[in-house]
Amino acid sequence: MILILLGPPGAGKGTQAKLLASKLQIPHISTGDMFRDHKARGTELGKTVDAIMSSGGLVPDDVTNAMVKDRLSRPDVAGGFILDGYPRTTAQAGFLDQVLVSMGRKLDRAVSYEIAQELLVDRMSGRRSCPTCGAVYHVTANPPRTAGACDREGAALVQRDDDKAETVARRLREYDSKTEPLKRYYHERGSLSEVAGTGAPDEVLAAALRVLGRAS
Ligand code: AMP
């Protein structure tokens, strides 16, 4: 199954992508995680995107598209994959269409997580993640067993630079102007399904599995 997850920053796409990937046994491809990995490793790409990401802007389409194309050339995508945070612009969506055609593959569904705008700032500002395993928590909605420490690794949880209040507003503006229009793009192609992004992670997962025809 080939899936795209859409929704504003803070809608829970990352958490849902991990749950879906584990349920469907297909890779989770997050462009945000890939860029963060490049930054952490200090690669040329990491250096290029560092300032853009910290300001809450979008990395240029050509840079992002090249990274995704390369990722989709790996053999582990043969059984399907989940794209989280890509595409984010209409130009990226068009590029992805071409890549899928060249692979002889077809998108199954674009799942859009719907959530009221006023909840997003709290979701992002309360988000904490484990620097070791990438597990994501929320200080009140999904806290770790011990405050500030990862349940699995025990590592001290960190806040992403771009989840800090100053950057959140810019990310939401970028979403509204550049990414929200993708819902129409996929709706017009008959591929869009909307799922309520509020509620506990397992409830949201169950709703997504229902629209994908994979409810157990
Ligand atoms: P995310 O973890 O998906 O919220 O992404 C974090 C940041 O990485 C974004 O705010 C952008 O700066 C960058 N980024 C991730 N995916 C894309 C994309 N598809 N196009 C452009 N920039 C992206």
Image: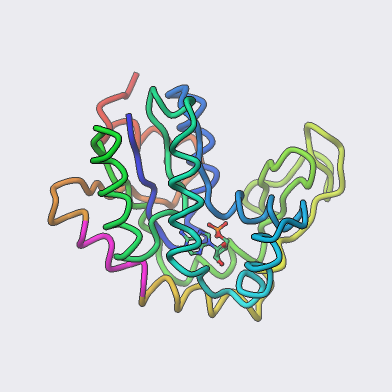
183 in magenta:
yes
Residue range of the region highlighted in magenta in the rendering: 178-185
- Dominant secondary structure of the magenta stretch? helix
User: Is the N terminus in the top left, top right, bottom left or bottom right quadrant?
Assistant: top left
Badge count: 0
Q: Residue 62 at what x, y percent from top left?
A: 44, 64
Question: Looking at this rendering, what residue extends furthest in the top direction?
Answer: 216
Query: Viewed as shown, does residue 1 lie left or right of 47?
Result: left
Q: Residue at x 27, y 68 (%)?
A: 181
Q: Residue 123 at what x, y percent from top left?
A: 58, 61
76 in magenta:
no
Identify whether 133 is placed above or below 159: above
Q: Nearer the viewer, residue 13 or 81?
A: 81
Which image quadrant for residue 65? bottom left
Q: Nearer the viewer, residue 214 or 196?
A: 214
Query: Viewed as shown, does residue 194 lie left or right of 149?
Result: left
Q: Residue at x 57, y 55 (%)?
A: 32
Q: Residue at x 43, y 65 (%)?
A: 61
Q: Residue 8 at what x, y percent from top left?
A: 44, 63
Identify whether 14 is placed above or below 19: below
User: Is the C terminus in the top left, top right, bottom left or bottom right quadrant?
Assistant: top left
